[in-house]
Amino acid sequence: MKKTVGYQKVVKWLKTRKRKPFPFQEETWASYLEGYSGLVNAPTGFGKTYSVFLAPIIAYLNEEGNGSKRKGKLGLRVIWITPLRSLAKDLARAMEEALFQLDVDWRVGVRNGDISVSEKQKQKRAMPQVLLITPESLHLLLAQKNNDNIFDDLTCIVADEWHELLGTKRGVMVELALSRIKGMVSFRENRTLRIWGISATIGNLEEALAVLQPDHQVLKIIVKAATEKKIQIQSIIPDTIEMLPWAGHLGIKLADKLVPVIKKSKTTLVFTNTRSQAEIWFQHLLKIHPDFAGQMAIHHGSIDYELRNWIEEALHTGVLKVVICTSSLDLGVDFKPVDTVVQVGSPKGVARFLQRAGRSGHSPFETSKIYFMPTHALELLEVAAIKTAAKTQQIESREPFILPFDVLLQYLVTLAVGNGFDNKIIFEEVKNTYAFSELLAEEFDWCMQFITQGGSSLQAYPEFHKVLFDETDGLWKVTNRQIAMRHRLHIGTIVSDAMLKVKFMTGGYVGMVEEYFVSKLKPGDRFNLAGRSLEFVMVRDMLVLVKRSQHKKTITPSWLGGRLPLSSNLGAILRQKYSQVLIGEHEEEELKVMKPLFELQESITHVPRADEFLVELIHTKEGYHLFAYPFEGRLVHEVMAALIAYRISRLIPITFSIAMNDYGFELLSDQEIPMDDAIVYDVFSPDNLSADISASINATEMAKRKFRDIACISGLVFQGYPGKYLKNKQIQSSSALFFDVFESYDPKNLLLRQAYDENFHYQLEEPRLLHALNRIQQSTIVLKWAERFTPFSFPIKVDSMRESMSSEELEARIEKMKAAVFKNLD
DNA sequence: GACCTGCTGCGGGTTG
């Protein structure tokens, strides 16, 4: 470590703040001074941010000798990319304070959609030395005219929360922007930029760094905290296992046990898995403990942005005692005093759970404490699995996104809207990114043709001739001002569903609900949103008008959100835990509590051991069921169920209805399912997988759905001007139209190929499916027959009632289910 | 009265 003036100054300051400079900070600073790029990985509260932020400051103080006053005019030095706008606000505050204390005359600027036009113009005249920016706004900078000297003094780019962007198209946006800025800087000044990432713990940190800084010539380093963060995981275990339902996902049965936890803590975050679950919990806690009124808030993605800002601010000042939230508060509460975290229901993955645990106990010396509240009996084993995973550090990887052509097309037009681009230079730059390292010259040519002529099928339409060649300087540009403006409005990779804003008659926004939910409402109907009881009045101009309701009885909207499956990591550990419950005596409380339930399971059919795979054939009044438990998450189960159903139907003509959850799936038929030890290995075989998947599912229809986002991102479909967005249906139908055109006239279309690839990879999760089938083949498949449901099959059975939409059938099934319950409890 | 499923994230600037 170079003991320079700047370094000592910073250490002195950190000591006055009672922030011990942790060993890895020195390492970060040293490697920065030596010109490294790198990735910093440490738990929350270890000062990752200071460590990375202060590195360029130290370099600056060194450059200037002892002087803190700048010589001459200093431009933009550090670009700090954050995935969240709210995070930028908190960071700016902390950075400004640090700069002030160190007497460094730098300015900090925030640039994102929250910033006013005049502020942006001010920035353009004189860039702040530190710019906090989102990936989208960074691309918007590239889409500006005369942007070439913005980056003149830049020495460092930081990607904060890099694990969060990695593996997404937003991450690819960062990769592309970095490639361009590197290109501009090295072309003009022949100097290399330092690029630093800040990341939570994930399984593939090396790869994460390689994505951020793919340059082989650059010196690279991963800096880790020397000490581990202590995490205490406490399950909320019911007095008797009977208190926990066998199925269900809400968990409010144990709510009484949560009240004392909240009361004895200063501030508690309660994470739920869905927005409607958060609303229900909010109402329920208020009901059983009315004193929480005024100290409790609810925070999720469908709550009005202003209200959420207020809640985050209130967390800051410590006004709130408890906040019920979804993953909307996963990031960006680092600066807020939270001492207790509760996870309701399955966290679905190890990394996510540990990240949430880290929201509490914000210093390396404190222990993070997280309570786990199971929502059904089997979920208790998930805690046991996570405890093991935390101990052995089996944390999921984030797989980088590869070859998203929609993002590339958008990027090329972005550059053309800005200063224009040289296609040869840009091809080289793009090819040097991790995401596009496999990009072929002909694929790039196809992209060029697409943005200049609309590809081979849209040549007749001038609105797709976006980019023109400028003979005078040899650059590709967008000259049409309307096309340029439309493009700027559409920069980004987040394609949202059409949601309607909910507003009081008297004014004031509450939040958002989906079109389809509103379509079911009649005037006078009551629903919950943002913890309030509302009465529906009418829909006008895409606004849902409501008034306050005094009635207690309301319904809660359910939003059609993403379906986050159980991670394969957690699934694997969970399978181990299942096999252990019946064997020997256990220290682990969760396993002990589960024993009676597993004994019942064993008495009806079987509890699979580590090298076994259980298939249950259950005959009830309802029909013939096949249950299987791969623990691979519901997406994989959905495809696997369709695959097995298809393969059985090749043996005899038979039709099935299918149900699944994160643990397993069910096939149900009114005729007997042909099954024996030979057949079962055949139907679970990995052979001929791709062909059988194609035959068992409608890949075209699924790809078409994926194509909607791709069409929006690539600029094929215009989503409308702000405040006048198109309805879902319109976007769906125009993207479907393009899909059909390409299928018929342009089968080599890269966006079409991308839609199929994304479907196979992210929807059907084919690699994971293949892996699962291979594992099943190598294990002993245990076939068991029974006349009633088992504890394992019961939750899937209950879920399946909700899957089916036809109402009379549903009614009938619920009746049959009830009978099955009683039979089970005999 | 019991029972409820499905996350998050972003967002015009030029030219007169």
Image: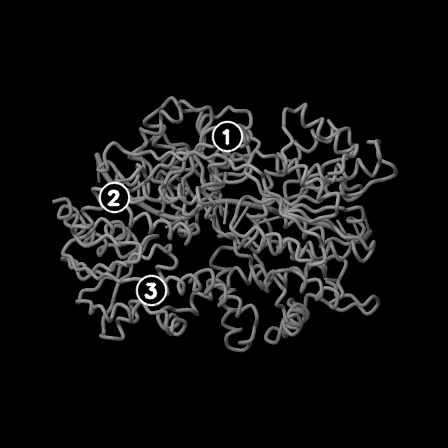
Label 1 and label 2 in one chain: yes
Q: Position of residue A366 (x, y in %)?
A: 51, 29
Residue A367 lies left or right of residue A373; in this view the side is: right
Q: Secondary structure at mark 1?
A: loop
Residue position for label 3? A778
| CA distance for labels 1 and 2 | 36 Å
- Nearest the camera: A342 or A734? A342
Q: Is residue A566 above or below residue A285?
A: below
- Name the image quarter holding residue A224: top right
Residue position for label 1? A361
- Nearest the camera: A503 or A772? A772
| CA distance for labels 3 and 2 | 26 Å
| CA distance for labels 3 and 1 | 44 Å
The colour mode here is one colour
User: Is label 3 or label 2 in front?
Assistant: 2
Q: Are marks 3 and 1 in contact (CB under 8 Å)?
A: no
Label 3 and label 1 in one chain: yes
Label 3 and label 2 in one chain: yes
Chain letter of disc 3? A
User: Which residue is farthest bottom?
Assistant: A745
Three-letter code, disc 3: Gln
Residue A133 lies left or right of residue A229; in this view the side is: right
Residue A709 lies left or right of residue A324; in this view the side is: right
Chain letter of disc 2? A
Residue position for label 2? A584
In this orientation, does residue A560 appear? yes
- Name the image quarter holding residue A184: bottom right
Q: Are marks 1 and 2 in contact (CB under 8 Å)?
A: no
